[in-house]
Amino acid sequence: MLAMIVTAGLFADAAWAAPEKVPASGFAWKDGAEVYIKVCAYCHEGGPVGPQIRGRELPAVYVQTVVRNGFRAMPAFRASEINDESLAKLAEYISKN
Ligand code: HEC
């Protein structure tokens, strides 16, 4: 009986010690193109969901505002999903490509 309790305790410890898989901090998108391809293109690239946003010279400020606040059917993205620095790069990428 004692052995069972000790064993259970060991397993519980092991579970606690499991490495954190989600990078809670320190995660950063490589550049604007990466964010666009992995997050925005799903809805904004040749599909029926969202309008074309590249190649229209949309002002970077407008893109940032839409991404942070959402716009009708467009979902908002928080800083925990796309931080300010990445959003600035993303907006620049979209307005110039
Ligand atoms: C889940 C699908 C979805 C994703 C993901 C998404 N969007 Fe959108 N977006 C939409 C839809 C739908 C609209 C059109 C909203 C409307 O007019 O009702 C839109 C509209 C926009 C507009 C306004 C376009 C215009 O013609 O004025 C911008 C800018 C925009 N999205 C940027 C982005 C960016 C940047 C990303 C990536 C961070 C992104 N969106 C990700 C669905 C999406």
Image: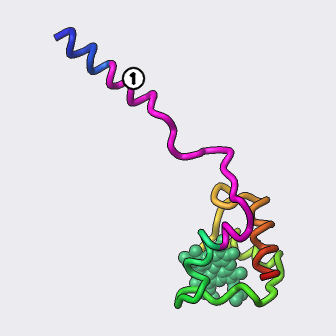
Q: Nearer the viewer, residue 19 or 88?
A: 19
Residue 33: x percent and y percent?
71, 71
Query: For the magenta stretch, what is the residue range?
Result: 10-36
Q: Is residue 5 above or below residue 77?
A: above
- Name the residue at 63% across, 73% down: 37
Asked if residue 87 lies left or right of residue 13, the reply is right
Asked if residue 82 lies left or right of residue 48, the reply is right
Q: Quadrant of the N terminus?
A: top left
Q: Is residue 8 above or below residue 49?
A: above
Q: Which amino acid is tagged 1?
A: Asp
- Name the residue at 66% across, 72% down: 36
Q: Quadrant of the C terminus?
A: bottom right
**In this rendering, does residue 7 appear at all?**
yes
Residue 78: x percent and y percent?
66, 61
Asked if residue 11 lies left or right of residue 17, the reply is left
Asked if residue 82 lies left or right of residue 84, the reply is left
Residue 24 is one of the magenta-drawn residues = yes
Residue 3: x percent and y percent?
21, 11
Q: Residues within 10 Å of mark 1 (few under 14, many from 20)?
A: few
Local secondary structure at mark 1: helix
**In this rendering, does residue 72 appear at all?**
no
The quadrant in which residue 15 appears is top left
Q: Outermost residue toward the top?
A: 2
Tally the marks: 1
Q: Which residue is mark 1?
A: 13
The quadrant in which residue 57 appears is bottom right
Q: Nearer the viewer, residue 85 or 66?
A: 85
Tell me the quadrant of ligand 1: bottom right
Residue 23 is one of the magenta-drawn residues = yes
- Name the residue at 63% across, 89% down: 51
